[in-house]
Image: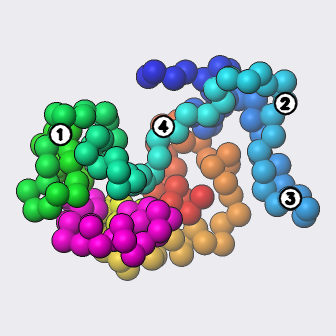
């Protein structure tokens, strides 16, 4: 809880300030506006990333699962030199979510993939993890919300009630 919103939280979306509103028109599509004169440095949104991926030169400085800064106190992967973890729990979680897939090829991935492709691959595996690595379940969940025009502003997520697939598709 290092950062705090500069304004009261939105009643349905607690990680954004209540001064933010979703608008939509033919010229710009969907976009967010504010009804308040914001000042530089004010915090209007705090959200954990769904997926994350370290740049290659940061692999020995940060946990590749939670990104905590534990330089010189990281646990290396048991199978490669390209991933470090801050704890055995992070090592286990990282292995389950993504590292078991890129462990054997992590050095090659950095040479053949752009950063965007690496984060896309991580995002795909983390989405699969939510659905117990059942590709059909993930596809069905995404298809359920594919034609749904609602946005995160339309759902009350302060109690975690929003569908998992909606979060992935938004």
Which residue bears the numbered disc 1? 74
Say which element carries label 1.
loop
Question: Which one is nearer the viewer's eye here, 82 or 5?
Answer: 82
Query: Which is closer to the viewer, label 3 or label 1?
Result: 1
Residue where numbered disc 2 is placed: 35
Q: Please give the name of the residue rendered at 73% of the width and 24% of the height, measured from the top-left corner.
A: 40
Between the residue at mark 2 and the residue at mark 3, the CA separation in whole angstroms equals: 18 Å
Question: Quick one: label 3, few (<14), some, or many (20+) residues within 10 Å?
Answer: few
Compare marks 3 and 1 and give the one earlier in the sequence.
3
Number of disc labels: 4
Left or right of 47: which side holds 112? left
Q: What stretch is highlighted in magenta?
A: 95-122
Marked residue nearer the N-terminal end (2 or 3): 3
**Residue at 35 percent of width and 51 percent of height:** 57
* Horizontal and vertical percent position of residue 149: 71, 63
Q: Earlier in the sequence, mark 2 or mark 1?
A: 2
Residue denoted by label 4: 159
Query: Residue beneath label 3, please?
Result: 28
Task: Give left or right: position of 87 versus 144.
Answer: left
Label 2 secondary element: loop
Point out the tag, 1 or 4, that comes first from the N-terminus. 1
Q: Which of pointers 4 and 2 lies earlier in the amino acid sequence? A: 2
Task: Please tell me whether residue 57 is drawn above or below residue 6 in the rendered image.
Answer: below
Decide: is 138 above or below 130: below
The N terminus lies in quadrant: top left
In the image, is residue 100 part of the stretch drawn in magenta? yes
The answer to whether marks 3 and 1 mark residues whose Cβ atoms lie closer than 8 Å is: no
Q: In the rendered view of the protein, which quadrant contains the C terminus?
A: bottom right
Question: 146 and 121: which one is in front?
Answer: 121
Asked if disc 4 and disc 3 are in contact, CB closer than 8 Å, the reply is no
């Amino acid at each position: 809880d290092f950062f705090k919103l500069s304004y009261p939280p939105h009643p349905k979306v607690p990680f954004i300030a209540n001064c933010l509103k979703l608008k939509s028109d033919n010229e710009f599509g969907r976009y967010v506006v504010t009804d308040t004169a914001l000042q530089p440095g004010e915090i209007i949104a705090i959200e954990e990333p769904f997926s994350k991926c370290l740049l290659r030169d940061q692999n020995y400085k940060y946990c590749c699962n939670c990104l905590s800064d534990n330089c010189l106190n990281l646990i290396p992967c048991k199978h490669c030199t390209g991933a470090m973890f801050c704890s055995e729990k992070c090592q286990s979680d990282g292995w389950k979510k993504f590292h078991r897939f890129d462990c054997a090829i992590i050095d090659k991935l950095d040479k053949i993939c752009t950063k965007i492709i690496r984060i896309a691959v991580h995002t795909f595996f983390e989405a699969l993890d939510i659905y117990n690595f059942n590709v059909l379940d993930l596809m069905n969940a995404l298809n359920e919300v594919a034609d749904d025009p609602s946005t995160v502003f339309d759902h009350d997520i302060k109690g975690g009630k929003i569908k998992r697939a909606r979060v992935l598709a938004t």
